[in-house]
Amino acid sequence: MSKLLIIGAGLLQMPAIQKAKEMGLEVAVVDINPSAPGIPFADHFFKISTVDEKEIVKTAKTFKPDGVMTLATDMPMRSVAAVAIFLDLPGISPEVALKATDKVAMIECFKEKYIPSPWFYVVPSRDEFKNVLKSISPPFILKPNDSSGSRGVVLIDSLDKAIDGFNYSKSISKSGIVLVEEYMIGPEVSVEIITIRGKSTVLAVTDKLTSGAPNFVEMGHSQPSELAVESINKIKEIAIKAVQALGIDNSPSHVEIIVTENGPKLVELGARLGGDCITTHLVPLSTGIDMLKASIKLAMGQMPDIKTRLFKGAAIRYISSKEGVLKDIVGIENVMKVKGVRHLEIVKQKGETIHAVHGSGDRIGYVICQSETSSSAINLCEEAIRMLDVIII
């Protein structure tokens, strides 16, 4: 039986664990949390931090997997690359993993390769930030060098908020480095790409809905993009150039782009499957491509099937509410009876404190719908959420 090592066993990795088992693979997972929800679905569990490259490589040497991967999380990609290079498995190199997980290295690479991207400053300290403030003016974005899920990202729209914003962003940054970036205005999309032996194929362009300023938390996605064909073609071109610039040659990629008045510009790139159910649910529902299965096959050194079989619309919308303690959510059964609703997930428990949405972890749950077009799938999602009664006390 072929073996797959998955870095992480949390909710984000659950679809990969379950899909690998469906494919008949022997699955081992690595996670520091012995109560991670994916552990019961795997064959083996190793209690190791997902970023402890040395211990993970040591474990992989004993387990001897035929492939290694993670899903929707950036920093574990360094461990994935370390295992791949040590055991000569398909995947990206440690050098590529560094560029894809270090925002400074990434944006500097884009600049060097002339990939359209925002102006930026690399700021390691508050004193240096104060110096930068002498040469720029709001609005601009602050973002931690090494976070994900919108954590620590904040819009500064006035100078009196700048220092507090910098302190917040820096507190999230493991390295202590903060990026000061151009505030780009325009529609935001993600591009789902799979690169097989150096050839990159765009599987989907996804429209994104965020909570807006100041934190820009993702609150919805839909496929296919409703932007003009000319704009979509330019987005695809830039996304593939970005993948090539980082040196990704055998991996899925999730590329984020904003379409400004001066054309599409890169936000950032992940050398892995996209999260927020984009690659696990929306891509299959809109295109018929099982991107997760394809990525597992790619990690195992097999040729994946990426032929488009559907031309549908798919959307996800996240559920939020006022702050307080979650008492109950009424109406779930009725929502699941609505034609076109494919999935409804509540991630918060009764009795849990609900906070304002500052990051992806603050969202209550989500609904996923499929329809003939993107707009009708979005409408279905919004209708389903209106049917829910979220009781907060």
Image (tube, helix red, strand yellow):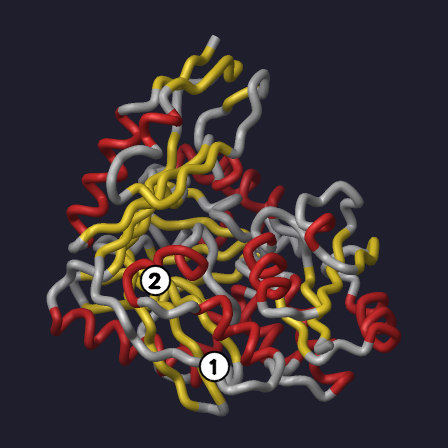
Q: Is residue 391 visible?
A: yes
Give the mark, 2 or 1, whose residue is nearer the N terminus. Answer: 2
Say whether residue 372 is left or right of residue 62: left
Inspect the image, locate mark 2, and give the three-letter code of the amino acid beneath it. Ser
Q: Residue furthest top?
A: 393
x and y percent of residue 35 in the render?
76, 41
Inspect the image, locate mark 1, and give the three-letter code of the amino acid beneath it. Pro
Instruction: Give the labeled residue for mark 2.
Output: 190
Q: Is residue 145 above or below residue 4?
A: above
x and y percent of residue 150 in the render?
47, 47
Instruction: Give the labeled residue for mark 1.
Output: 304
Quote the CA–CA distance across marks 2 and 1: 22 Å
Say whether residue 299 is left or right of residue 237: right
Q: Nearer the viewer, residue 143 or 375?
A: 375
Q: Secondary structure at mark 2?
A: strand
x and y percent of residue 284 in the render?
36, 62
Which residue appears at 24% of the width and 34% of the height? 382
Which residue appears at 64% of the width and 69% of the height? 24
| Rendered image quadrant of residue 26 | bottom right
Q: Are marks 2 and 1 in contact (CB under 8 Å)?
A: no
